[in-house]
């Protein structure tokens, strides 16, 4: 009876801890979600958020395999597509679901910490996760981070259970969750061979067949998910891509003579999302001299990355040292949008809660002092393998987020270790630990590579873009002007301000700004926009000069051909309009232009009597244009 009472009390205590962690985590996150609703990014996502949003909407509309072979792993977009299919398009519900999953991850951190060390350490780690600023931030984003952490924690929890029980079902379940996290972010595959070697060499007392069976069970959990994605790529995408084909591009961006270790940029590849996508393909095909499959494009960039590594090994080694330094550094490097910009809209994120510097310093002492048992070895191997999968590319803050839950657990272990040493009055160990931790905090707060500088001009320009996208032109103008107070030669901000004046019909102001932009540096955006304004004013020859200059400056920019084509379409020059719009389609335009290109091509072909081509393009334009169905009926 006493034993049953003890079990009941234990279960009740666990349930209370779970409830407290979940409620605290959720309340903090829902408060943050309410606070950031006024953020211009909230309903107007950019970069990866925008890409996920557009892909998710396509999936919700039934276009399941249109993007095969997948440029990026499809796990999160399909998850987002399911949310849109059930709840409709919108940004509050998917963000709400993200914070619910984030709160559940805090609970999972408790269970993993309990499995690794003890109930108390797990509980502290779970509570610390509730208040960890970057977890709060990423849980509200339309990014893969919260799913990565959720599935990773589940996978490693079941692996730890398997270590204790040796039950086949536990390692099979672990493999299933590892399959899920792999189709969200393929980096996690790196742990599979590491785990296989761990099982082979750490369990030598077991028969070889038993060890191979264990590895096979884990892999069996992963295979269905990977094979499903690969099958879609082969059948629907007509290319042998395992999960996604962006690996080669990202590898090169992280390993070239211009790489900075922190961002996915290179002088020869455009920094915008679709511009970079287009350049990756166009440059590869230009250098090879033929059209390439996506997998071949990826291989081309892998080869270039490795060429740099082998031709300049010392430069590459210095770059790797920088990346490892950035991995341990306190500063959260933004990747898609400025984390510091988001903090201006959320007082919660501005509160100096737990940051990476404190956590990593405490966690390292935990690594040093924790017992060398099987569970520790397994977690160490995961942390090392996953960290390597980051630094081999580049090191933005969000890529290291899956490491954070385990760092919190080791940090919690350190807290209890120090408390225990105080109880035991072991002053030398206490002093040594505190000195070491303080030294590490100082080190991780250093800025040897100048990465802690925040470009507030770019932040205001980005705010302006979001206000522009939502139609709030007065706020957009305010933000662009504020951006220019930080850097009066910011071409993007000048052009964006010119675009805003164009939308308001203030053509004289717009022309002045675009010419100011060209005086700083010749650029296709200003050339095209000047061409558009002059075209609307009836100054055809002047407009064509600007369009031709834009083509000469960048002959692979789809927007140049789009604007040129629209110019000729306006003046009923069907031949040149069709020619330019067709070229625009060849250079992988941003999806926001694709429907317009097909719609205008459909109308142009209809006007010259080419019914088949008109029908083809109008069907591809879809019913987003009110007269498409009427035009299609007129064809029949």
Image (cartoon, grey):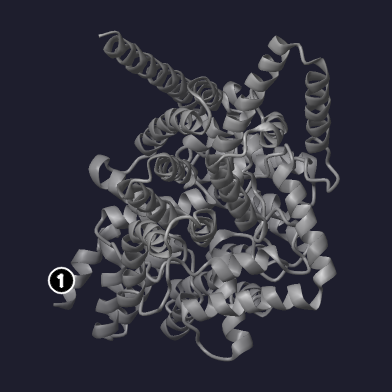
In percent of width and height, residue 138 lies at 52, 38
Q: Is residue 245 visible?
A: yes
Q: Along the horizontal axis of the image, is 561 left or right of 523?
A: left
In the image, is residue 176 above or below residue 479? below
In percent of width and height, residue 262 lies at 70, 53
Between 545 and 549, the one nearer to me in the picture: 549
In percent of width and height, residue 489 lies at 79, 52
Q: Along the horizontal axis of the image, is 272 left or right of 189?
A: right
| Quarter occupied by the N terminus | top left
Q: Along the horizontal axis of the image, is 317 left or right of 555?
A: right
In the image, is residue 501 above or below residue 343? below
In percent of width and height, residue 628 lies at 25, 65
In the image, is residue 244 above or below residue 106? below
Q: Quadrant of residue 8?
A: top left
Residue name at image x 66 percent, y 22 percent? 417
- How busy is the neighbourhood of tag 1: few (under 14 within 10 Å), some, or many (20 plus)? few
Residue at disc 1, secondary structure: helix
Q: Which residue is mark 1?
A: 633
Between 51 and 521, the one nearer to me in the picture: 51
Furthest residue in direction bottom, as rendered: 289
């Amino acid at each position: 009876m006493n034993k049953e009472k003890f079990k009941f009390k234990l279960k009740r205590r666990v349930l209370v801890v779970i409830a407290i962690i979940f409620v605290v985590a959720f309340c903090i996150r829902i408060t943050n979600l309410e606070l950031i609703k006024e953020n211009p990014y909230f309903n107007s996502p950019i970069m990866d958020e925008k890409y996920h949003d557009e892909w998710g909407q396509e999936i919700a509309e039934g276009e399941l395999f249109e993007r095969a072979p997948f440029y990026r792993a499809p796990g999160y977009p399909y998850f987002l597509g399911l949310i849109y299919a059930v709840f409709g398009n919108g940004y509050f519900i998917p963000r709400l679901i993200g914070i619910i999953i984030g709160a559940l991850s805090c609970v999972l951190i408790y269970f993993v910490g309990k499995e690794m060390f003890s109930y108390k350490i797990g509980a502290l780690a779970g509570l610390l996760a509730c208040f960890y600023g970057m977890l709060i931030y990423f849980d509200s984003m339309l990014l893969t981070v919260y799913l990565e952490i959720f599935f990773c924690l589940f996978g490693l929890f079941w692996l730890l259970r398997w270590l204790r029980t040796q039950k086949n079902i536990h390692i099979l379940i672990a493999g299933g969750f590892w399959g899920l996290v792999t189709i969200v972010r393929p980096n996690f595959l790196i742990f599979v061979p590491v785990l296989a070697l761990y099982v082979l060499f750490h369990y030598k007392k077991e028969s070889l067949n038993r060890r191979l069976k264990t590895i096979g069970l884990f892999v069996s959990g992963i295979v269905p998910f990977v094979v499903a994605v690969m099958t879609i790529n082969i059948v629907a995408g007509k290319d042998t891509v395992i999960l996604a084909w962006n690996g080669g591009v990202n590898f090169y961006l992280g390993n070239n003579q211009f790489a900075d270790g922190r961002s996915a940029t290179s002088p020869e590849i455009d920094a915008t999302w679709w511009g970079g996508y287009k350049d990756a393909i166009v440059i590869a095909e230009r250098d090879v001299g033929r059209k390439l499959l996506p997998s071949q494009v990826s291989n081309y960039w892998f080869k270039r990355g490795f060429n740099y590594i082998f031709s300049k090994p010392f430069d590459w080694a210095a770059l790797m040292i920088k990346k490892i330094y950035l991995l341990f550094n306190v500063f959260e490097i933004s990747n898609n949008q400025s984390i510091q910009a988001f903090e201006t809209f959320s007082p919660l994120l501005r509160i100096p809660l737990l940051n990476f510097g404190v956590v990593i310093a405490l966690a390292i002492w935990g690594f040093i002092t924790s017992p060398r048992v099987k569970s520790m070895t397994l977690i160490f191997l995961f942390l090392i393998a996953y960290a390597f999968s980051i630094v081999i590319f580049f090191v933005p803050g969000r890529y290291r987020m899956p490491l954070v839950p385990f760092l919190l657990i080791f940090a919690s272990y350190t807290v209890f270790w120090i408390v225990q040493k105080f109880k035991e009055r072991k002053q030398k160990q206490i002093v040594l630990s505190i000195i070491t931790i303080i030294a590490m905090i100082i080190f991780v707060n250093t800025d040897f590579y100048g990465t802690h500088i925040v470009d507030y001009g770019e932040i205001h320009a980005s705010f302006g873009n979001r206000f522009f996208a939502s139609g709030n032109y007065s706020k957009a103008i305010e933000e662009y002007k504020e951006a220019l107070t930080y850097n009066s030669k910011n071409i993007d901000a000048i052009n964006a301000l010119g675009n805003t004046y164009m939308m308001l019909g203030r053509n004289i102001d717009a022309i002045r700004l675009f010419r100011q932009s060209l005086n700083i540096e010749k650029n296709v955006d200003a050339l095209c926009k000047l061409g558009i304004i002059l075209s609307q004013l009836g100054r055809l020859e002047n407009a064509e000069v600007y369009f031709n200059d834009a083509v000469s400056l960048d002959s692979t920019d789809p927007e140049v051909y789009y604007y040129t084509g629209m110019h000729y379409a306006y003046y009923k020059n069907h031949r040149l309009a069709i020619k330019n719009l067709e070229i625009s389609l060849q250079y992988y335009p941003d999806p926001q232009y694709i429907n317009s290109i097909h719609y205008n091509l459909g109308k142009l072909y209809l006007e010259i009597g080419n019914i088949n081509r008109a029908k083809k393009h109008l069907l591809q334009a879809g019913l987003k244009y009110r007269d498409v169905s009427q035009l299609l009926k007129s064809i029949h």
